[in-house]
Amino acid sequence: GRIENSTDGDAISTGDTANQIIQPQNPSAAATVRRNNSFRRSAIGGEEENPGNDARIITVKSDSQAEGRLAARLTLRVGADKPLNSRNAASIIEQMSTAVRQPDTQNKDASGNEMNADLTAARSGSVLAPLTHLGILSFSGDDAEAFLQGQLSCDVSGVNSESSTWGAFCSPKGRMLASFLLWRGETGFLMALPRDILQDVRQRISRFVLRSKVKIADASDALALHGAAGPQAAAALRDIFPALPARPNEVRHEPARGAAMLLEDGRFVLAVPAERAAELRQQLAGPLKAVDWRTWHWLDIRSGIAWVTAATQDQFVPQMANLELIGGVSFEKGCYAGQEIVARTQHLGKLKRRMFLANVAAAAVAGDDLFSEDLGNQASGTIVDAEFSPDGGCDVLAVVQIASRENSTVHLKSLDGPALRFLPLPYAVS
């Protein structure tokens, strides 16, 4: 998160306080505090009257995933009786950060639940979603393969022009700083990962390039990611990708049209040149219903695929998020960042936490704590990913103490919070 503070006087000291409160709650939130006596136009849009000499306009907006996620915005007026300063900044920023963290309230029905049209279509029909919540990093150069092999949890050398793999980029302590989908492009490797951590990961991994002949670039504007799913998806895609992948993790490339990847659950991920994206959507508009990225996000959750985001960075070793169960960890390759911890967890340690699929009758977001009776006020787990469910409430991927999952009831946010109802994952969890 970042705070840009342009207020005068003692209000300047609120920047540090605001950062301490907002960053843990929503690291992708940006807060801008402005004092402007001739303020005429709201940062949210539209004309606004002059708020007065002693008023402050405080605007909070989410600037990540700009095309896909509804920006959460809140405007507060603080009058002369409530000057913005270090004494009241904490409560004001807490109000703003709470508002930013709330799940998207657009497209809700009268009871506050997400409208089910897109989710129902994804469950029983065929859909096409722009994956605007994901970005792409490219790795090119003579040493790209060797460099990535020494940084990532997956076997990069085993990824050829017709294959893809899940993987993780870990800290030296073996905790995931990113999870991703990796494949080969025309000039090197391409990595799809959440946009809210893309620049952070780019900066972190660039520190290890040193003298290697590797160029790391943000290719998010050059390539557009889409997801296609459902019984009609393959037939619809064959008009664009005649040699469609037929095996899980297989990749097929079409000149000038991009790449198509088949996931384990039968869904397709498409990486197409950005200038061809509108044409792609138009071609597939008949057989595939257009849905937004959150519908695809829900499908990922139901498939047990966890994406590390800013809210969950540096919290889990790959096995806690079941990454080795979907082929994202190689235990035969050589050293990489965090490898010693990951290998020790696999071969010598006993994993105490695992990721499970569940439904909860409340709004949940990544990073929410979980509690269970067996551990009292000590958190027993964390929400890794969450999305509204067509059955009501939210479907979540939660890393939970295995003993709490088996012997207790797990609750959202507090012991008095709604209980998680666990659901079967599409793969076995030992």
Image (tube, helix red, strand yellow):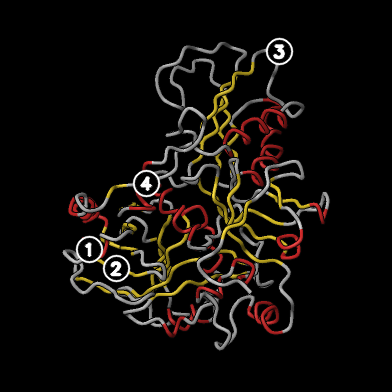
Whether residue 240 can be seen here: yes
Q: Amino acid at mark 3?
A: Asp
The picture places residue 269, in percent across and down from the top left corner, at: 34, 63
| Front disc: 2 or 3 | 2
Distance CA(mark 4)–CA(mark 2): 19 Å
Which secondary structure, mark 4? loop
Kindly indicate whether the residue at mark 1 contacts the one at mark 4 (C-beta within 8 angstroms). no
In the image, what residue occupies the spot 30% across and 59% down? 222
In the image, what residue occupies the spot 22% across and 63% down? 237
| Residue 81 disc label | 3
| Front disc: 3 or 1 | 1
Q: Amino acid at mark 1?
A: Leu
Crowd band around label 2 with a 10 angstrom C-alpha radius: few (<14), some (14–19), many (20+): many
| Residue 237 disc label | 1
Kindly indicate whether the residue at mark 3 contacts the one at mark 4 (C-beta within 8 angstroms). no
Distance CA(mark 4)–CA(mark 1): 19 Å
Mark 4 or mark 3, which has the lower sequence index? 3
Is 37 left, or right, of 216 in this rendering?
Answer: right
Q: Amino acid at mark 4?
A: Asp
The picture places residue 99, in percent across and down from the top left corner, at: 59, 33
